[in-house]
Amino acid sequence: MKRNVFEPEHEQLRQTVRTFLEREVAPHTADWERNGQVDREVYRKAGEAGLLGFNVPEEFGGAGISDDFRFNAVIAEELGRFGGSAPAFTLQNDVIVPYFLHLANDEQRARWMPGMATGETILAIAMTEPSAGSDLAGIKTSATADGDDYIVNGSKTFISAGINSDLVVVVARTNPDPSAGHKAFSLIVVERGMAGFERGRKLDKMGQKAQDTAELHFDNVRVPKANLLGEEDKGFYHLMHNLPTERLSIGIAAIGGARAIFDETLQYVKDRKAFGQPIGAFQANRFTMAELSTELDIAEQYIDRCLQAALDGELTAVDASKNKWWCTELAKKVIDRCLQLHGGYGYMNEYRVAKAYTDARIQTIFGGTTEIMKDIIGRDLGL
């Protein structure tokens, strides 16, 4: 089905992304997966190509495109199509840079944004803790005021870009009062090299092995209060403001990846023969492909409607939650069924569908689990 949300400039960016991935990413993916992280140099090259920091203001070296999420969507979709070995550019563009755009003061912008535009500054956000995942109210990492500084203590886990990152936006408890509820947290920017800030294990994941995911530890890290992002004790509300577009981005990447696997599988079932005919000609398989094609088209249309809502400033948390859970669950379903159609070959890592199967599994978990998304929708229904 024809998609009408994108304009020529977005399709031009799409070709730029594909060319970049072919030239700068594909030749290195095997090494990156073995090492458990991408080379930092790819971020700098992405900055040169305009794939990072395009939403950073022009005065700091970006393109100043912060009000058209369709550019973000094109990059997310193409990274999804490429697969889990792609660098975490969407984490930078769609998740973390917006916090700085919306919350940073003039001094912070001048200090940090130029590096975001060039790709020389890699970003991470640290929310999850060993004992606090979806329930952010359970966060124990603390930032205690001490003169002009905060003293940060605690640990975080499952942090994407945890090894490569130069700036980490840490969600920390600044109000120790147990009755403060969600009004107890702040966003504190911890910088590479600060005394007491240590990277823990590079975690061994079942998929997306080229994207570094790590534990982070803070042992009496002295952070200037000038590194407070936004308002003190308003961190939870700052997080909620950016979650809709983050979840939209995850859904976009999920369907981009599922569409790529579907297209490859369609060709496979046309070429692979059994009992004297292409396996796609058997009714059960033909019906499976027909169902998946239909559902992918429907998902893309909902994504495009959400993109238009984001463009109009009308994307709600509920809309984004619907997009996130439906698209990631559909991607999981599409890839599983495509693997089945590949038979024994689908279980071989030399076939892309096998890798996609493990790479995609995290998408129903990070950015808010499917169950949390349904809870948000259900509460909006008054239930």
Image (spheres, helix red, strand yellow):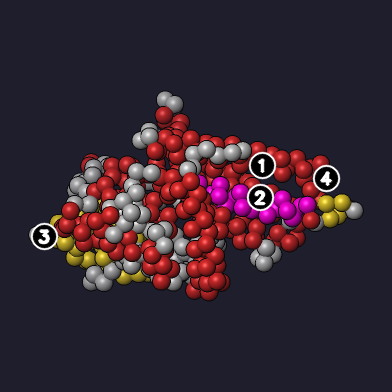
Q: Residues within 10 Å of mark 2 (few under 14, many from 20)?
A: many
Give the residue displayed 46% in from the left and 69% down from the top: 38
Q: Which residue is mark 2?
A: 262
Q: Which residue is mark 4?
A: 282
What type is the residue that disc 3 sits on? Asp
Mark carried by residue 293: 1
C-alpha distance separating marks 2 and 3: 55 Å
**Which image quadrant is residue 164 in?**
bottom left
User: Residue 135 location, x and y as percent?
Assistant: 37, 46
What type is the residue that disc 4 sits on? Phe
**Which image quadrant is residue 286 in?**
top right
Among numbered discs 3 and 1, the one appearing first in the sequence: 3
User: Residue 354 location, x and y as percent?
Assistant: 65, 60
Residue 137 counted in the magenta span = no
Among numbered discs 2 and 3, the one appearing first in the sequence: 3
User: Residue 379 location, x and y as percent?
Assistant: 42, 30
Magenta residue span: 252-270
Q: Are marks 2 and 4 in contact (CB under 8 Å)?
A: no
User: Residue 93 location, x and y as percent?
Assistant: 38, 54
